[in-house]
Amino acid sequence: MKKWFPVLACAALLAALSASAADSRVEGKAVTMILKNFTNPFFITVREGGEAAAKEYGIDLTVLAPLKADNNEEQTHMVEQAIVSGADLVIMCPSDTMGIIPAMEKLEEAEIPVINLNTRIGGDRKLAKTFVAIENFECGYESVTRLVNMMGGKGEFIILEGVSGAQTSIDRVKGAHAALEKFPGVKLVAQQPADYNRAKAMDVTQNLLQAHPNVRGIYCCNDEMALGAVEAIAAANKTGQIFVGGSDGNADALKAIRDGKMALTCHTDPYNQGYQSVVAAAMALRGEELPDLFRVSIKVIGKEDL
Amino acid sequence: MGETAPDDGISLRVFLDRYSRILILAGIVVFMAVTRPDAFWTMSNLSAVAFQQAPFMILMSFGMTLAIITKGIDKSMGSVLVLSSVLGAGFVKNGQFLLGISLALAVGIACGLVSGILITRVGVAPFIATYGVEWVALGLAFVYTGNVYIYDFPQEFREIGTGRIFGILPNLALVTLAVFLVLHFMMRKTVFGRKVYMVGNNFNAAALSGVDARNTVTIVYIVNGLLAAMTGILYMARLNAADPGISAAFTLDSIAASLIGGTSFGGGKGSVAGTIVGALIIVFIRNGMNIWGVHTTWQQTAVGFVIIFSIFLEATTQKLTAFAAGKRKTGE
């Protein structure tokens, strides 16, 4: 996986990086990074990227995630704890786009700057200095385009969404729909949430395959669900007949692609997302102006790319 | 179910108590079979639901039912499932199946023992004791895995959960059936089973009348731990991964299946046979709604309605009993 990072998002970052890796204004500053969970390998890699950057900048980084995966309540407590323990900056990857707003307002009140990572903080007001993320729409669009081309441009299609209401899932699904519009021969027969969860995706796929036995392609909004779909397809003795696309590019998914069980994934570069969020944090701590978006690039990976 | 009642004036109550859930299940199945015979009423769908999806929930719900019959609850089952399976997974992946499975079962038993001791010797309320164990077990699972998934097991191991004996009978269904027969016999025909119901009806009265109430409850929680570990091993074989993210869903589903199956939170009432029906109702609702293309978020609402309906049924049968008893007293 290491060959794609660090793919730096923009020239400004390159400059920032090379200019001042050891900066006394940043050295020793306490930064708290709050992620969605530690059960999905994606966020483990985000953490690794963040920790690597923190080491370079001499930042004292604490990475936290709810024990109950994707729990807004726990994330809110973590923010409150960061305020009490005197964090200089918070990097926030919210599980609940709207639910996290009150906690973000508390940070604003305490005058602690926020870097928004991966999933957008909701609301009309700008509560974060910048947003470090990939373009999820592009991710869904590129993946589905390639997936449908593998299907020969026709056939029945299923989409598995992530947690209901999750912005990453909403944007990837929008991208997927935009791609499907280009192919009149493809029929979207079902679209269901499976909560970004492997076990749930397996049950949902198994049930959907009963209703739609002729499905030729399944697009899943993350790799965990794609791997669940792969097992359901294997249980139905249909391995190789259905093209499964995921998103994230985690190790299990890459292995499944190599084994021919999965068609493709979209490498959303979690390492670089984590890394860039800390770079942005360092810039913010130095008082530099930040662009509204730090865009981390994506790459669709099929068997021939491995 | 656990108690005997006089014959007259209670036939409706017995009928509701014994058959209402089966009627709900039959209603769901008939509705689906009539409306979607193409997708639902097929051998491959019915066997996928009954033999691949339902057994896990049924096994977990058996344990939950026993705990609720003792007037307790086992919040820790999902986490114990995760901890035992991740600890066993490393060995299984290396081909040491026996070692991995034994370790997983031992971990399950140990967790159950801890819950049992906390409840009966330390005097902690079951919800709180198992809630504590739930956190510890899940925490240890995360620490052990270092947040790295354990994925892709040898095919021979996966055969345990996905294979068929003689090429026909799915192993998973056979294991579930065997566990059911053992537990059903235990609860209905053995002294231990009677003790479980007695303890659930009135812990102190049971203890005073010479039942070793504390050991009875401890053993129930050990059985739960064992069932959770067993489910974990089988689930690992099905999912081809040890997944720490599944714990909460399993615990909540098994509580729902026990309630729908007629187990009463008042203690002393319920049966493992009812629990099978409860679990099947939930699994068929999900399957049916998937086939109908209803958004999965609605499944939660639908299962909730069935739970409420079951509790309503429970209350109604109790009122009917009281009414019948009153009638007899006044000689009407």
Image: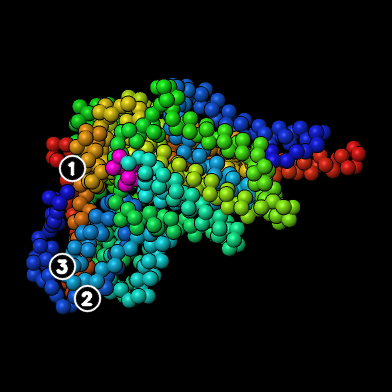
Label 3 residue SS: helix
User: Which SS type dominates the magenta stretch?
Assistant: helix
Q: Is residue A168 left or right of residue A49?
A: right
Q: Label 3 is placed on what type of residue?
A: Glu
Which mark's residue is nearer the viewer, 2 or 1?
2
Q: CA distance from mark 2 to mark 1?
A: 38 Å
Q: Residues within 10 Å of mark 2 (few under 14, many from 20)?
A: some
Q: CA distance from mark 1 to mark 3?
A: 29 Å
Asked if residue B94 is among those painted magenta in the image, a careful observer would answer: yes
Tell me where residue B273 sits by quadrant.
Answer: top right
Does mark 3 fall on the same chain as mark 1? Answer: yes
Residue in the image at 37% along x and 75% along y: A84
Residue occupied by mark 3:
A56
Tell me where the magenta segment starts and ends, as one range. Answer: B89-95
Label 2 residue SS: loop
Residue B247 to residue A304: above or below: below
Q: Nearer the viewer, residue B253 or B293?
A: B253
Residue A28 tag number: 2
Query: Which corner quadrant holds the C terminus of chain A?
Result: top left
Q: How far from the left and from the top, in percent, is residue B26?
A: 58, 28
| Marked residue chain, label 1 | A
Residue occupied by mark 1:
A300
Which badge, 3 or 2, is on the more N-terminal residue? 2
